[in-house]
Image (spheres, grey):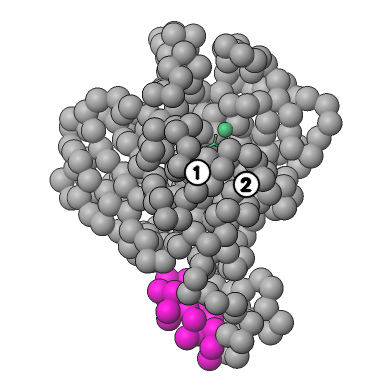
Amino acid sequence: MLIRSSTANPILPSEITSEALFQSRRDWLKTAMAVGGVAALPALSACSVEAQGVKLAGVKANPLYLVNDEKLNKADEFKNYCNFYEFGTDKSDPPVMAKSLKTRPWTIAVEGEVLKPQVFDIDALYKLAPLEERVYRFRCVEAWSMVVPWVGFSLAELIKKVEPKGNAKFVEFVTLADKSQMPGLRSSVLDWPYVEGLRMDEAMNPLTLLTVGAFGEMLAPQNGAPVRLVVPWKYGFKSGKSIVKIRFVEKEPKTAWVKSGPEEYGFYSNVNPMVDHPRWSQASERRIGEFSKRKTLMFNGYADQVASMYAGMDLKKFF
Ligand SMILES: Nc1nc2c(c(=O)[nH]1)N[C@H]1C(S)=C(S)[C@@H](COP(=O)(O)O)O[C@H]1N2
Ligand SMILES: [Mo]
């Protein structure tokens, strides 16, 4: 169910059925109005639902996905230190510039080499599988990291629904590129739209999370609202934000970062302390909020779940 975090008259979980989670924004507003909370909602039509810090209640923590012995980052750290080049290249740009990103209506087209291509409305996507909370380490290629409680479900759940054909070998993720909303598109720092990709087995790996929230709330716009990917054993740029299209293809997708610098950013980009970036070491990283560096873990600590997918591959060549 949806409850607002910052309203003066909080909507009690008991006042809203679990169905409310799946209501369209309009219906959700009606619900809010019915319990007298709407006066506290500032000009919602002009911005995203997510910008309001909407709580995602009734989400169960999945005990299989925890990061033991490492502290969670603070929600404020996560929301204020962001990479989202469509809203500027400085870590502090997206929290300001993405505020007014329109996230309703929003659809994700799932197409390509599948038997059942479909366009999912964001509200239908919420219904596709039970939302769960998973704590993952998240490691940026720039050698900083965080520990984040994400909310979503395995991308595999969506993939099963569209029934990929035998020749679907890769999955391409295309994210929003809207000049009217994204000032960063004026810069040619990347070839827009931001495109990412995974091999089919990577996309099907249960760790790969189709993500709609974090820290118990809907994703803030700067963190990729309304829906993004989180691929925790790969460098952060593989986790595309604000996804509008998922395409199943035969050939390895041409991703935005590989196009921008193929000798610096590989298609695989598995977190690997033994393979340095040409301009810096990947052996260690700075956890946001900590002073001393910590050692980077092979596959970001997820080797047990993912190493077998790369058996026999030269990870220095396929970096
Ligand atoms: N569309 C889009 N997705 C993106 C990016 C981007 O610039 N545009 N940056 C990536 C990078 S480099 C990282 S590290 C993560 C950062 O996610 P966060 O800001 O939510 O921590 O988002 C990734 N997804
Ligand atoms: Mo990154």
Mark positioned earlier in the residue sequence (2 or 1): 2
Which image quadrant is residue 36 in? bottom right
Extent of the magenta region: 15-34
Q: Quick check: which quadrant has ligand 2? A: top right
Q: Position of residue 236 (x, y in %)?
A: 55, 34
Q: Position of residue 2 (x, y in %)?
A: 54, 72
Residue at image x 58%, y 85%? 38
Identity of the residue drawn at 54% across and 88% down? 33
Which structural element holds mark 1?
A: helix
Above or below for 25 versus 209? below
The image quarter containing residue 251 is top left
Depicted 33 relative to depicted 84: above or below: below
Depth check, front residue: 13 or 29: 29
According to the picture, the residue beneath numbered tag 2 turns out to be 93
- For residue 184, which numbered disc appears in the image? 1
Q: Magenta stretch mostly in which secondary structure?
A: helix
Q: Amino acid at mark 2?
A: Asp
- At label 1, the amino acid type is Gly
Q: Residue extending furthest front? A: 186
Report the side of 212 relative to 5 (left or right).
left
Give the distance between the C-alpha atoms of the residues marked 2 and 1, in whole angstroms. 10 Å
Residue contact at pointers 2 and 1, CB within 8 angstroms? yes
Query: Does residue 103 appear to the left or right of 133 in the view shown?
Result: left
